[in-house]
Every structure is written in C-alpha cells, then in structure tokens.
C-alpha cells in the first residue's frame, strides 16, 4: 500500500469544556470524524471544526453516536431500529449543514464509541446506520472495521465500504479492539504507535496483545484526537509514513 488515509475524531469540545486541539490535528490528518452533538460537540464547535476542515482540504465525516452526552457515547442505549435510524439521519443532516456553510460537505459516516462496536457486530444496528446514511445521500462512504456487519450493510445499500485500523488501540487476536475498560487498551508512546502504523500501512498487519500478528486490510488509519499527546502522536505517525514512502490522501 503506497497511499493511506489518516483520520481523527474531532469537534468534541462542548461549551467551556475543551477536548483536543482541532486546529493542530487538521493540519496533520486527511479526514476528520466530526462529532454531531449526540456524544460531544456543540453547534459552534461543529461549525468551527467543519470550517477548519474545509480550509485545510480535509474530508468531513459525520461521527454519529447513541444520544449519550453524559457518557461520551460509550454506553450502549437500547433503541428500536427506527429510533436509531432517525437519530443517525438527524446527526448526518445537522453536521452537513455546517459543512455546506463552510463550502464542503459530509462525504462519509463513522459511528462513535458504543455505536461503533454495536454496528460492527450487530446486524440490526448495522442496517439502521447504513439505511440512514443511504437515505440522506447515497454517495456517502462508510468507515468501520474490516469485515464488520456495518461494512456489509453499507455494501448491501450500495454505499462504498472503507475499512480502518487504529493506530493507538490494542487489538485482540480476533481482530477486535481491546475494551477501553481494560488496562493498556490505549497506546500513548508516539514512537511505538508510529512503528505500528507503518506496519499497518505497508504490511497490512499488526501485533495483537497475545503477540500474534493479525491482518488489518485498512484504507484508513485512525489516530484519536482526545488521546493525551494526540498532536505529537499524529505528527510522529505522519512523518513515519512519509519516511516509509506512504502517501497520505483522503479516501472520500
């Protein structure tokens, strides 16, 4: 692989509560997964994130979630299929309004937190998310774990599926992510993360927690914007990819 996308979760500040450095990250990544107000992000934060992405030529993705501001979208909420479909459609449309005001548009969808995991493994949730995206704009692409239920549902709807890998998250031997509740689930050493990313981009593999090497056929690599030292990590990743001869380019 000589070209890879670099994405990050942005637009997650809320009111006086600041999370991450969107401006710095937007100068590094090629795609921005921007919160839509259900797990984080207020209207002014979303507008600013979309404007910054447009200015930097960064692709805008709607990072949809369960309605869970208190839990930062990391708690599963039992919603009917129609309720979830409506919630996802609502979020995409809201963010796209700010994206269009900035002279851009939402080009892909990526669930956040508990919804990411639910849609990756639960067929009902996957089809609700994919249906909402297709209903809003059938040109949208869907970003999720390779071989996930969500990417299969997106394909069934005619949406382009895009597999991603996580630069700063520990992997299980089966290709899933270690829960954030577990110790050492999130990596923080920029050098270690940079080496992992090069392996992901060049060899399409990563070392799991048990020492085994697993396949990660991903077109996009995620560096979380809320990780301590996120800007230094993202910068190290970008430089490591450049040294390895890998170009960074948005998939959408």
Image: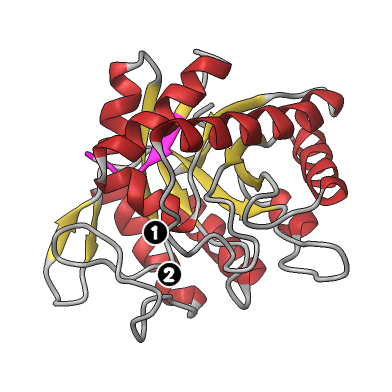
Q: Is residue 95 positioned above or below 134 on the image?
A: below
Colouring of the image = secondary structure
Foreground residue, 136 or 104?
136
Q: Which residue is mark 1?
A: 197
Looking at the image, residue 6 lies above or below residue 211: above
The verdict on residue 146 being magenta is yes
Secondary structure under tag 2 reads helix
Q: Element under label 1?
A: helix
Q: Is 73 covered by the magenta stretch?
A: no
* Residue appearing at x 39%, y 59% in the figure: 197
Is residue 96 or residue 232 the one in the foreground? 96
- Judge by depth and name the residue closer to the eye, 211 or 161: 161
> What is the tally of numbered marks visible in this picture?
2
How far is the residue under mark 2 from the one under mark 1? 6 Å
Work out whether 62 lies above or below 190: above
Quadrant assignment, res 104? top right
Q: Position of residue 195 (x, y in %)?
A: 38, 67
Q: Is residue 86 left or right of residue 218?
A: right
- Is any atom of residue 244 visible in this view? no
Q: Residue at x 33, y 82 (%)?
A: 182
What residue do we see at 26% from left, 66% from top?
Answer: 171
Name the quadrant containing residue 176.
bottom left
In which quadrant of the rendered view does residue 148 lie?
Answer: top left
The C terminus lies in which quarter of the figure?
A: top right
- The residue located at (40%, 31%) in the rendering is 128
- Which residue bears the numbered disc 2? 193
State whether residue 95 appears in this view.
yes
- Residue 145 location, x and y as percent? 32, 45
Q: Are marks 2 and 1 in contact (CB under 8 Å)?
A: yes
Residues in magenta?
A: 142-147
x then y, percent, for residue 4? 44, 40
């Amino acid at each position: 692989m000589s070209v890879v996308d670099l994405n990050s979760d942005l637009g997650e500040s809320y009111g006086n509560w600041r999370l991450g450095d969107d401006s710095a990250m937007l100068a590094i990544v090629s795609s921005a997964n921007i919160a839509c107000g259900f797990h984080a992000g207020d209207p002014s934060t979303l507008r600013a994130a979309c404007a910054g992405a447009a200015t930097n030529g960064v692709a805008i993705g709607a990072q949809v979630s369960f309605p869970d501001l208190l839990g930062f979208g990391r708690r599963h909420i039992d919603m009917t299929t129609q309720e979830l479909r409506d919630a996802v459609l609502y979020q995409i449309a809201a963010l796209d309004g700010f994206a269009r005001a900035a002279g851009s548009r939402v080009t892909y969808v990526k669930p956040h937190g508990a919804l990411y995991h639910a849609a990756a493994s639960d067929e009902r949730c996957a089809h609700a998310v994919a249906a909402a995206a297709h209903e809003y704009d059938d040109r949208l692409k869907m970003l999720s774990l390779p071989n996930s239920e969500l990417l299969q549902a997106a394909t069934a709807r005619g949406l382009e599926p895009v597999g991603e890998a996580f630069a700063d998250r520990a992997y299980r031997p089966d290709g899933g992510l270690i829960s954030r509740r577990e110790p050492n689930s999130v990596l923080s050493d920029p050098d270690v993360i940079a080496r992992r990313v090069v392996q992901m981009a060049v060899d399409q593999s990563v070392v799991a927690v048990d020492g085994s090497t697993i396949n990660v056929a991903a077109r996009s690599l995620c560096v979380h914007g809320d990780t301590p030292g996120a800007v230094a990590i993202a910068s190290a990743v970008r430089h490591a990819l450049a040294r390895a001869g890998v170009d960074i380019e948005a998939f959408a």
